[in-house]
Amino acid sequence: MLRLLPAIIALGAFAAILAGWAAGGGAVEAAWAPSWGLELSFELDGLGALYGLLATGIGFPVFAYAARYLPLHLDHQGRSHREEWRFFGLLLLFMVSMVGLVTARDLILLFVFWDLTAVSSYFLIGYDRQEAEARSSALMALLVTGVTAVLLLAAILLLWAEYGTFSLPELAARARPGALVTGAGVLVAIAGLAKSAQVPFHFWLPRAMAAPTPVSAYLHSAAMVAAGVFLLARFYPLLALSGLVLDLLLAAGLASIAIGGVLALTCDRLKQVLAYSTISQYGYVATMYGLGGGKSVAAAAFYVLSHALAKSALFLTAGAVTEATGEDRLSRLGGLARSMPALAVGSGLAAAGLAALPLTIGFFKDELFFAASFDDSWPAAVAAVAAAGLTFAYIGRFWLRIFAGRRRSDAVRLPPLLTAPVAVLGLAVLLGGAFAPPFGDLAAAAARASAGAVPPIEPAYHLDARAENLMALAAYATGILLLAAPWLWRRPAAWVASTGARLGPERAYTVGLAGLNRFSDAIHEIEVRDLRSRIAAVLVPGGALAVAGLAATPTAGAYRAGTLSTDDLALVLTLAVVALAAIGTAAPRHHLTLLLSVAGVGFGLAVVYALLGGPDVALVAVLVETVAALVFLGVFALVPRDVLRRMEAIPTPRRRRWRDPAIGIFAGAVVFFVVWGALSRPSPAAAIADEHVRLAPQAHAKDVVTAILADFRGLDTLGEITVIAVALVGVTTLLARGRLR
């Protein structure tokens, strides 16, 4: 019973969201970082309700399925059942992250939840961490979705810099067409397409099928990939301002429909067929957003809803069939309807919904898709029919190869919890076909949150010759033809699959990752060679970044330099002596001479502090330099003299005679210009220091220095102590388990 607790939590969350939506939605706002304009702002609008109900509603049967599936999965791998709670904890974390994502109204808050979904999905995909495939698949998913998340953050910062707000409603009201909105829209679109596994970022999703079946059924049908198209829906008011962005979505969607569908026809593994099917199905959604207009946006929202119900059931079916037969390939299955009738019926309803057969909710998803594409243009209508026919073929192939035909493998009796969730989801697909208006109302509300005024969604059966019905009949005929005549598509589809494997984006990812690893190894080899190389590995990239930043920043009239007077002569001479002493530290080989040169730099700076009117700082500098010099002298006294002489006699390699001075000059020049720029910039009329002085009494301090030392430095020290404590706990744990020898 305890294993069903996550399912009960998901059901409770579903009921809470449903009740909140029935009561008219609502919003919650609280101060987060007011000085930055950040708020903990959540709102349950139509779009949030749609995706929140999917995340929790589908989470309930999936979590219930996992309560029985996971113990069997761990037993097969010889693992302890104590690992169950890590799995369920990660699933619940993902569910909470998804609900937070779809209800967030602050862009930074949205980005935080966006990254939380990526992190939790990484651990879920790599749950079987003892398997190399699971680890590499998790890393691939994290890199593809995580790197593109940086583009989302860049878009958020661009929009904030232009419009001065992180609030989504305010941003939608203020945004105007232009190059900046187009650029930000492209970045958002790329992030959304990568998360929803659209071409050319689609390759991570089939690899993610290394995850346990409940992860695939939840993340890769109704949650994680749905988050990608949710992002497109949430930012649609901005994306619609640019025809270029809509064209990008249309091109990516059509490519995903075609490539995902063709690859689904060629796959033999159960979950990979469904993975490529998901790529193709979310291609429909991206296409509809690319078509633009209220009708297309409403059709996209309804499509997400109906697809999630059907696809999650089919993923659960794949796991149940593999558990019952020990087989995960279509070529080794068949005739299981007689031994697993309940599973066959439940998954059959789900497959019928995905194939858009009448009496299922899927019929209306294709009807809306057909209507939107027909209104756009005849090429779009033809593409829609071809896409629907392709879907009919690969889903029909999936279900028929498992449950129809000759029996090829034996099946054991399945526990009820591996069958009931499939039946529940299949009945939901059937219920949506019989009582579609509530589903249509929810999708219409979601569309209004994206596109404003949209026509109502009124799903109903019409026995006439309207365009949508004729397109549906053409799609069925196309699908039946593809099923009946595989010789028509087998060789071209195999060629597409093999070409993609050799030249596709996954190959580019693999080659690129290997190249980055080699580059990292080369830099590491240089860095760890000696102390000079390590310092050079820090100074050179740091200097290059500083120069790049200086080159990209407009500085005309931003800085000014003062003039020198006779009163500055002592300071200039002292700084010149310090500079000569600093240069002189590079010349001596004798350790005592080197120590005196370094101390000369420190004592010279102490004189500079005194000349600038800081005797207390000068005194501290003198004390520090004195103690440091004494410590070094003590160390030299303890080191055997022959060791010191041997070190002094080591010749300087020829390659370093020019490299080290060049790096030193470059780094010194960069530091000089950075310091010069910082010190010569005109002081603002209202400095932040004045505000700090004014607020010092509120921090219970007599001056700013006391407040900094007591509060900020104290908090920093507390953080450092915490890090050390965590490290000690980790080392102690490893020692206790015998992992450190």
Image: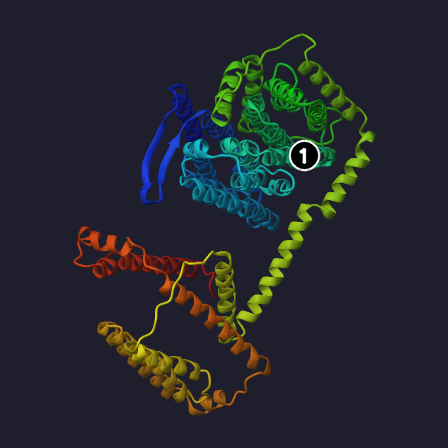
Question: On screen, 297 above or below 267?
Answer: above
Total labels: the figure holds 1
Q: Quadrant of the N terminus?
A: top left
Disc 1 packing (10 Å; few <14; some 14–19; many ≥20): many
Please state if 626 lies on the left or on the right of 251 as rendered.
left
Question: On screen, 689 above or below 580?
Answer: above
- Residue 325 visible in image: no
Residue 383 place in picture, x, y as percent:
71, 26
- Seen at 40% across and 83% down, the residue is 580
Residue 405 place in picture, x, y as percent:
75, 24
| Residue position for label 1 | 273
- Seen at 60% across and 38% down, the residue is 197
Question: What color scheme is it?
Answer: rainbow
Please state if 648 lies on the left or on the right of 281 as rendered.
left
Name, please, the residue furthest toward the top: 463
- Seen at 59% across and 64% down, the residue is 521
Residue 449 place in picture, x, y as percent:
47, 26
- Seen at 76% across and 19% down, the residue is 477
Q: Quadrant of residue 715?
A: bottom left
